[in-house]
């Protein structure tokens, strides 16, 4: 009986009942279904004590399943639910007598286990949330600042005020460019017209 107080088996066996012996044997063998079945035959305090052990065993098994990477998000809730059942059964057993140290210690074990499970559940939820957050896209290797050179304008805008001489030079340059465009259009038109036969 891994992790179970040895006093449980002695206590159930000491009751001298056939059901108590069978429940104790089932607990030792890890047969939780039989242990719960035979617990029904016991007096209420012992029945609650055995049921608490069965619920705690289910709690530990559910905890192992919830710890696996493939576990569903609700797996921790299953383990916590079994832990709460174990705590409640052991609490009823402990309150049934003036002093029952084994039942009292088991209530403490259940409380510690519930706290541990709540911490593990929070940790798992935080990890799942961080896995869902979008990761930043890697920056291109060419530019250390992550800017694409093809998207940058080649000529940066002029932000300072021009002198009158600079304005005149700029206007002359624009007029010259305009003359070049007109001349280019004319020559293109002549080339096109030269290849066209007139039928009039």
Image (cartoon, rainbow, N blue to C red):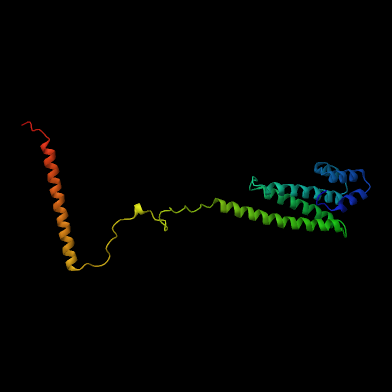
| Residue located 59% across and 51% down the image | 128
Image-based side of 47 in relation to 200, left or right: right
x, y percentage for residue 94?
84, 56
Return the residue found at the far top.
199
Q: Is residue 102 above or below residue 22?
A: below
| Residue located 17% across and 57% down the image | 174
Image-based side of 176 in relation to 148, left or right: left
| Residue located 13% across and 48% down the image | 183
x, y percentage for residue 191?
13, 40
Q: Nearer the viewer, residue 104 or 68?
A: 68
Instruction: Please give the count of numbered marks on the rendered protein.
Output: 0
The answer to whether one can see residue 115 in this image is yes
The answer to whether one can see residue 41 in this image is no
Image-based side of 27 in relation to 171, left or right: right
Q: Nearer the viewer, residue 20 or 112?
A: 112
Q: Nearer the viewer, residue 168 or 79?
A: 168
x, y percentage for residue 101?
86, 59
Q: Nearer the viewer, residue 166 or 58?
A: 166
Return the residue found at the far front.
142
Of the 4 image quadrants, the one containing the C terminus is top left
x, y percentage for residue 74?
65, 48
Return the residue found at the far left.
200
């Amino acid at each position: 009986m891994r992790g179970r107080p040895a006093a449980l088996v002695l206590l159930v066996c000491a009751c001298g009942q056939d059901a108590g012996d069978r429940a104790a044997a089932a607990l030792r063998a890890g047969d939780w279904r039989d242990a719960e079945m035979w617990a029904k035959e016991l007096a209420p305090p012992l029945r609650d004590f055995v049921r608490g052990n069965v619920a705690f065993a289910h709690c530990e098994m559910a905890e192992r399943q919830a710890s696996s990477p493939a576990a569903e998000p609700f797996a921790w809730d299953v383990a916590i639910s079994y832990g709460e059942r174990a705590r409640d059964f052991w609490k009823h057993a402990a309150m049934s007598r003036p002093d029952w140290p084994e039942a009292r210690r088991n209530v403490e074990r259940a409380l510690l286990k519930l706290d541990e499970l709540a911490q593990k559940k929070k940790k798992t939820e935080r990890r799942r949330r961080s896995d869902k957050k979008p990761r930043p896209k890697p920056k291109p290797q060419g530019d250390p600042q992550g800017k694409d050179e093809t998207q940058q304008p080649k000529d940066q805008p002029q932000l300072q005020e021009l002198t009158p001489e600079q304005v005149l030079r700029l206007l002359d340059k624009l007029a010259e460019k305009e003359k070049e465009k007109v001349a280019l259009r004319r020559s293109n038109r002549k080339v096109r017209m030269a290849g066209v036969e007139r039928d009039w």
